[in-house]
Image (cartoon, rainbow, N blue to C red):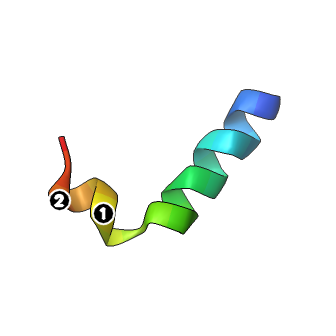
Amino acid sequence: LYFIVQYTYKLIYTGPYLRLGP
């Protein structure tokens, strides 16, 4: 479950950066 929390946190932390990235 840790990887899920880390992934979600990264998603929220990065935000639009993920959309610009690959």
User: 3 left or right of 14?
Assistant: right
Dot 1 amino acid type: Tyr
Neighbours of disc 1 within 10 Å: few (<14), some (14-19), many (20+): few
Q: Where's residue 15, x and y in %?
A: 41, 68
Q: Which residue is mark 1?
A: 17
Q: Where's residue 21, x and y in %?
A: 20, 49
The quadrant the N terminus occupies is top right
User: 5 left or right of 8?
Assistant: right
Spot the residue most to the bottom. Answer: 16
Vertical position of residue 17 compared to residue 8: above or below: below
Dot 2 amino acid type: Leu
Find residue 20 and name its label.
2
Vertical position of residue 10 compared to residue 2: above or below: below
Q: CA distance from mark 1 to mark 2?
A: 5 Å
Secondary element under disc 1, as helix, strand or loop, is helix
Look at 60% across and 42% down and name the residue there.
7
